[in-house]
Image (cartoon, coloured by chain):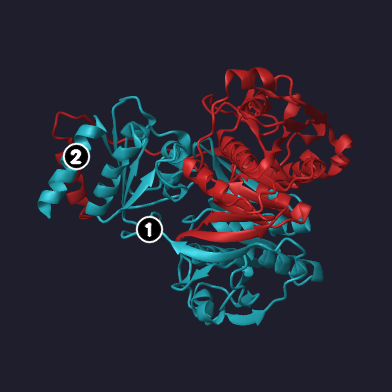
Amino acid sequence: MWKLRQRVVSLLPLSGTLFAMIVVVCVKQIPDPADPGALDPETKTLRRDVKLILDESDSYGVEMGLQLVDAAGEGEVRLVSMAPRNEVGGLRTALAMGAASAVLVSDEALAGSDALSTAKVLAAAIRRCEPDLVLTATESSDGYTGTVPVQIAELLGLPSVTFGKEIEVADGIATVKRQTEAGFDQVECPLPAVVSVTAGVVEPRYPSFKGIMGAKNKPVDELDLAGLGIDPATVGWSGARQEITDVAVAPARDAGELIHDEGDAHERILAFLDDLKVL
Amino acid sequence: MGISKIWVFGEATDAGATASTLELVTRASQLADTVEVIMSGDAAAVAGVLGAHGATAVHTIGPIEGSLGGPRIASAIAGAVEAGTGPDVVICSTSYDGRDVAGRLSAKIDRPVITNVVDLVADGDRLLGCEPVFGGTTDVTTGFTDSGTAIFLVRPKSFTAEESGGGPAEVAEIAVGDLGETGSATVKERFAEESSGPKLDEAAIVVSGGRGLGEAGKYEMIETLAKLVKGAPGASRAVVDAGWVPYSYQVGQTGKVVKPTVYLACGISGATQHLVGMKGSANIIAINKDEEAPIFGIADLGIVGDVHKVLPKLIEALQARG
């Protein structure tokens, strides 16, 4: 939010020297959460043959990256994404927000990829971007495994800070407020590093008309596994080494009493709580 | 033939081992011949309680001061796996640090993680994890197809912690390998947020607010009400994403799973992602304007009404009781 931006600006090196900061933001393009999902009856994985949009969780990382580059005075945000069929719908949204370019990895051998396969692909793509900082969401809105950020960091041999609420960068060090059970930790981490950011910590900008038009001409580097130098046997179905043994309908919970408030609903709530003796 | 050895990533605070650590140790001891814990810090302080819940040994990497545990614990486990002294299964809680450990370990030993698990079941000599999908309407059970180390991330409150009468776990030190740059993040200062009431995942009553509150300022009603019933305030993902309250308030698939005696949902429509986090509550009360809201499908007491009218009256009535 605006508070973060002020603080970041105040931390610019006193010497006034600017450094060109490359921030890579990992973005996932997912089926619109407003449309209900379904499992493919044959493969028992999520069906992906629908139009993809930018995962809202990733819009915070994109915004954070743009703000950090602004504060550094020079540099750019580069996007990295893995998606089927060279889908760019979500990438264009992030490019319209202000990201400079994108690397998109698509390959039929990636079907059935789990989080570790995804991390292998993203890590290889990130390496090409030579980032100072890698930003991710804490988890995607459709798979929500929450392991990809740290898997990427380990594959790249980088330190990581997860659940970041605020990030400041100065003198090659990221200072991150990390969410904890009790509150937050102030963590210092030398760059390059991977930081995952929680939702709601910045206000993602709406793409301007100019941004939307400009996004169409921004470079999207489309790669397959061969282009990244990844052996198809180590990712996707072949790399999963897991199987779904059962898919069952979960036991349903029944609805109770439904009443319309006639001005006395609060009394019904109190009576309900009194019956349970919880007050 | 069964599962021979499970390691649980142990987490502890000044108050002792965390609830989710004890839940995992309890469940693991029902499934495997040997259950051991791996942790950082003072293992002797929690060896008694871990042993009572079924662990026979606790491996500690020692004090880590301001360092982050994830890379260190993962390195120690990976070292044991490579030396052939490691476990068949590693289980971590879906906590801030648990995810760091599981993710780091996964990449280090090239083994996938089975995540968002709410139940663990034995299938011969392997372990299966059960995960709810599509807002909890469907349960998917997954297992590994080979005999390599299996890693599971299990959601808190999936099991009940129970003592089984074991003596203190034996404390042993375990070495951390070369971390390179991966261990270079350090905590400079810890901040505890002011919180007068019970924790969200431990409270007997949870009062949650959603988008139906209309604006950030109205969330105060939720805080006030939670305080009056000695409960904890919670929130739907929509209002967390909107920045009204911090992520730590979030109840749902991507937030905390809560199972209080009473869950009061105010202005929450009941998106599937929210229902997963609270449908295990013993009693559910929901207030929503829309009679068709999915939340009413699981509410024991559903009130079709305006939260801006019902909540002030409820607050007033509770204040009048003193």
Q: Where does label 2 land, which residue? A: B312
Where is residue B286, by image quadrant?
Answer: top left
Q: Which chain is red?
A: A
Q: Is residue B54 above or below residue B194?
A: below
For this rendering, which residue is in front, B184 or A191? Answer: A191
Q: Is residue B198 above or below residue A268?
A: below
Residue pictured at 58% horizontal, 50% vertical:
A167
Please, what is the three-letter code of the amino acid marked with disc 1?
A: Lys
Pointer 1 residue: B199
Of residues B36 and B271, which is closer to you in this image?
A: B271
Say if residue A46 shows up in the picture: no
Same subunit: marks 1 and 2: yes
Q: Is residue A124 visible?
A: yes
- Count of all numbered marks drawn on residues in the image: 2
Callout 1: few (<14), some (14-19), or many (20+) C-alpha neighbours within 10 Å? Answer: some
Q: Earlier in the sequence, mark 1 or mark 2?
A: 1
Residue located 58% across and 35% down the image? A59
Q: Position of residue A241 (x, y in %)?
A: 76, 47
Q: Is residue B211 left or right of residue B20?
A: left
Given residues B299 and A8, the one toward you in this image is A8
- Subunit that carries the residue with mark 1: B
Left or right position of A235 against B24: right
Mark 1 to mark 2: distance in Å? 24 Å
Image coords of residue B202 (percent x, y): 38, 58
Q: Relative to A111, does residue A165 appear above or below in the rendering? A: below
The colour one sees for chain B in the rendered image is: cyan
